[in-house]
Image: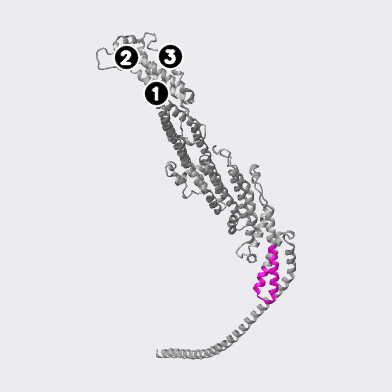
Amino acid sequence: MAKARNAAYAEEKAEVEVLKGQVTKHEDLSKRLKGVQARLHGDGRSVQESIGSIQNHTRENQTMAANIDKLVAHIEKMLVSGQDKAQEQKIIRAGPSQTGIEEYIACIRRLDRSLEQLTASKMRVQQQTIGDYNELLSEGLSRLQEFFAGVLSEKSQQIEPLHYITKQLPFPTFSAEKLSSLRSIDRCLSTPNARALSYNQRENIAVRIYSDLRSPYLANSLQSLSIGSITTSKRRNSDEPYRPGTSGIDLYAQGMENILGAESQHVQAIFSREDSGLVLESTCRRSLSDLAKTLRELNAQIKQNMTTDCFLAYEIVEVISRAGHRLGQESSEMKLFFADALKPIRDTAKASLPELLEDQRRRINALLTLSPDGAAVSFTSETMTRLQTMTAFSKGLSSILGSLGDGNWTSSSSLHTANSSASLPSLRSLDVGADGSTLLSHYVLDTIDTHLSNLEARARMLHKVKAVQGVFLYNTIALMDRMIRSSDLTTLLSNSPNAQTKFDIWRKRAIATYMDSWKEPSTALLDVVYTNRSSNRPASAASLPSADIIKNLSSKDKDAIKEKFKHFNASFDEAIKRHKELLPAMEREVRHGLAREISNMIEPLYTRFFDKYEAMDRGRGKYVRYDKGSLSGVLAGLS
């Protein structure tokens, strides 16, 4: 056993010795490797330093080579530009008409690019070439401006708008080809180099050329319509009210809307969005100034004849607002200009509404006499004609009434308020719908109420007989009602629930005033029955015949009945006579209406009284002049 362990131990010891020997070898190898690594690191540093120097020299050589290449390229471009200069000069000298506008513009753009490149090179040797190119570009741009102006001039001769309006022809416009050419020229003339050659470097020269040529064309073409709108608005007889459509203002508005609308299309097709607003405003400024001047002159005329020419103001507000609203969609500047130009006439139109009511009061109070037969005054027809005419301008009036305020036309301060500088409603407020109709119906009803109130007061002063007062007032109401039903006032007032109520109230007042003259004959038919007396109490007509009733009356009661018949006969005949005297002056509705009222009052009373006391004179006609049939015949003849 011991031997075996010793042998194993010796074997393990030998293995350990072998391992130690290998470790020693590895240590020696590591030392040699570290030495080699140190030597390699030093050699690498030397190589890196050498390579860095080589790289720097290589980079410098590459930069120099690139610069040489650029210099060669510039020289080549100089040679090429020198070779192309003659060709470009030939195109520029030929002009766009011979060369063609697209080729001419392409030439200018090539010159522009070449000039930018030559300028960027900053080579002294290029200065002469740069100067030559500047002169050539300046000449090209100048010829292009002349061509631009020439194309515009072809369609900038004054026209007669009335010819196109009456024949319903489209206003002259540029063809699509011309618009494309003008647009290309504008883009070319708006380049930095083109602006630099202008006297105002911030200005697009095409904008000034366009405005200078087209502005006189627009203003001169519209001048005849402006003059026509003024001359046609002046009438020989200033006392006659203005009749709608007799002024040329509508044609003026149509002409302006059409010609400026066409111009707006041109501007948008030619110029960029940044420039189009400025171009349109500067081109149309003169025409819009002429419009403002025309409206001021018309406004002065309207103020001198307010009650007759106020309708012209309503017409102007409507047609000019409509044109301004449509053109305002093209340019906000035009929208504001139209509003400013229209403001004086709008204020005058607002002032006219309370003025018309005041004119009614003045003219009615100035009446020194009224027709003795109760006929309506001619001013009633004139007033209703005014209201009928107003419906023709419902849109413009709705806007005016809306800015004045519901009911403010009746206040004492309305005249001052209407002339104040209160803010105006926008042009978009034309389409006011039901609210505008309601305001206009309120004004119409206030006008009618003012007219009837003042006429009633005047009739009480000038007509001493109530029958004449009633006929006069009833005639006036009938005339108004008929003129309403025969015009657009019917539609306007149909939306107002108070309209019919007001007329019914006035009609009842007129009838009541007239029927006051029939109180005397109707009162005579009322007999007194003393129900508290037990003796000699007359029986009712339904229970006893007339002869029995008369038999039961005392002598005193019989005398009283006889007097009642006499009184009725006299007062009835007088009322009939007075009615027939007034009958020729009564309107048809008045005749029928009053005859019906008289019959409804007299006939039932007389029938009852006659049935009760007809036996008073036993058919001799001494007291009872009318039987029931003859009375009905007389009453039937009243209409």
Residue 524 point in image, percent of width and height: 35, 18
Secondary structure under badge 3? helix
Predominant SS of the magenta segment:
helix
Q: What amino acid is at disc 2?
A: Ala
Would residue 169 be found to the left or right of residue 464 on screen?
right
The amino acid beneath tag 3 is Ser
Q: Is the image coloured rainbow, by chain, by secondary structure, or in one colour?
A: one colour
Question: According to the image, label 1 marks what residue?
Answer: 517
Establish if 209 lies above or below 442: below
**Residue indicated by mark 2:** 560
> Relative to the observer, which residue lies in front, 157 or 100?
157
Q: Earlier in the sequence, mark 3 or mark 2?
A: 2
Query: Which label number is shown at residue 535?
Result: none
Q: Which residues are the magenta region?
A: 113-142
Picture coordinates of residue 409, whole percent (x, y) = 44, 42
Q: Residue furthest front?
A: 368
Return the residue at label 3.
630
Q: Which element carries disc 1, helix, strand or loop?
A: helix
The residue carrying pointer 2 sits among few (fewer than 14), some (14 to 19) or many (20 or more) residues within 10 Å by Cα, namely: few
Q: Position of residue 585 (x, y in %)?
A: 48, 25
